[in-house]
Amino acid sequence: MKKALNCFFIGTLLGGLVACNNYSNNNPYSPQGISTQRTFPHRVFVSNPLQPNGLGGGSPAIDILDATKDVLSFFSISLLALSSNVSDAGMLAVSPKRDRTLVASPADGRLAIINNAAQTIASAVNLGGPSESFFVWTDNVTAFAAVPNLSVPGQSPGAVEVINVVNALVTATIPIPGAHNIVPSPDGKAILVFSDDSDAVTLLTPSLIGVTRQSNAQVPCSSTQMAACVLPGTFDRPIWAVFNGSNTTAYIMNCGQECGGTGAGACMTFISCTTVSVLDMTQTPPAVTGSVPVPAATIGLLQGNSLFVAGTPFLAADNTCAGVTTTAPSCGRLTAIDLGSVTAGTPVAITDGYHNKMELGANARLFVGSRNCFNVNSGSEVRGCLSIVNTSSGVSASGVIAPPDNGDVTGIAPIPDRTVVYVCEGGKLRIYDTTTDKLEQLTIAPSISGQAIDAKVVDF
């Protein structure tokens, strides 16, 4: 028999229907980049909401790849188990001990919990609405998820859900109107919550949840700590944060006019200027001690003494593509902030859109992804929402590459101890070599059938 059936039931071993790809029985690593092995020692999970199911349609599943050879497993994890179903497969989050993976299901507002060792869906939790920001806490048992549209009796929609991932139960609901993004400190003692269309930053203290009585999370923070409170300070549509490794400082990305804010009037560096606020976490309550002007800020990444910040300036005067060979009408900006002097370097042009993905790969290559960018696909120019920046000698215009691909960037996963980075762009899985800043050869790279939405390294 040269080929196996396209799809079949594994039964209770895999928890239900498993959608599969064709493979060759004669070669465990076929020319199509597909392996007959069910598992690998170092895995990457890729969420796929439309994996072909052999019935003329697509089903939500998790594809499995060998992170050492970039080979796709013949087997996958179905999210249509008999006991726990979700109807979609979106963003992923891996637990600290790497024994579980959370999978967002935006279509039905649920969160699937994957048993990584068994490679099955263990359970699912109803969040009450879609979430784009969630993580498993330092105890490896508790998860937090921001649900901006969750219905809360007597209050505006929005909350942070607290979940026991072992028992698949929501254990607490913290009402925070419009809660959209949550960022934990490295030690897990603090969580910063950012809400849609808001100039407030909410401080969530996990150790006080269920200890202090509080019906409204929108009270100001004071010297008396509470489970949730609003930090003092002036922010302009804050949307994301980056903590330093010692948990003493958080850098707040103010989205400003890009997110409907007013813009910092006192900042004269750029016409559509906003700022990165410096938040001292050692004070009670934490307080803003300074700010750094930047042209735009929606996502950031800290590496050594440099904080990389990306965004798309609101005004045309600051988002031009001058100096860049492209037909795109606007460009985003990447700014490197020196945390020693707390000053920003000269911004460089990158692809535009709403930037919400940033990861550092090997060879000091910074991968910056956005959604809703201006895709170019005309003549000899093809560019989408991904920028690759060589940061080995600082940030300069000559070090920026916009790869020839189209579509929103929905996932970026650098592979440890290798010079490759997995990127989900436009529903396709792309594998970039950081020694060349180019895609792997198509004869080598695996092809995901369906849609590749997010990718996470499960094993190191």
Image: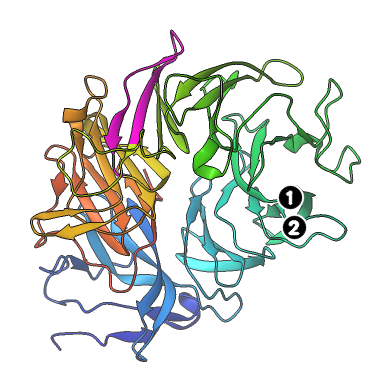
Residue 181, by quadrant, is top right
Start-end of magenta stretch: 333-351
Quadrant showing the N terminus:
bottom left
Residue 456 on image: x %, y %: 40, 51
Q: Magenta stretch: residue 389 in it? A: no
The amino acid at mark 1 is Pro
> Which label sits on residue 89?
none
Residue 100 on image: x %, y %: 52, 54
Residue 217, by quadrant, is top right
Residue 398 on image: x %, y %: 16, 29
Q: Residue at x 47, y 19 (%)?
A: 268
> Which label sits on residue 177?
1
- The residue at the far right in this view is 213
Residue 26 placement, left or right of 105: left
Q: Residue at x 48, y 81 (%)?
A: 16
Measured along the vertical axis of the image, is residue 359 above or below residue 189? Answer: below
Quadrant showing the C terminus:
top left
Measured along the vertical axis of the image, is residue 7 above or below residue 248? Answer: below
Question: How far apart, in angstroms, are the residues tagged by discs 1 and 2?
Answer: 5 Å
User: Would you say residue 389 is visible in this rendering?
Assistant: yes
Residue 146 placement, left or right of 273: right
Q: Residue at x 68, y 30 (%)?
A: 189
> Which label sits on residue 157?
2
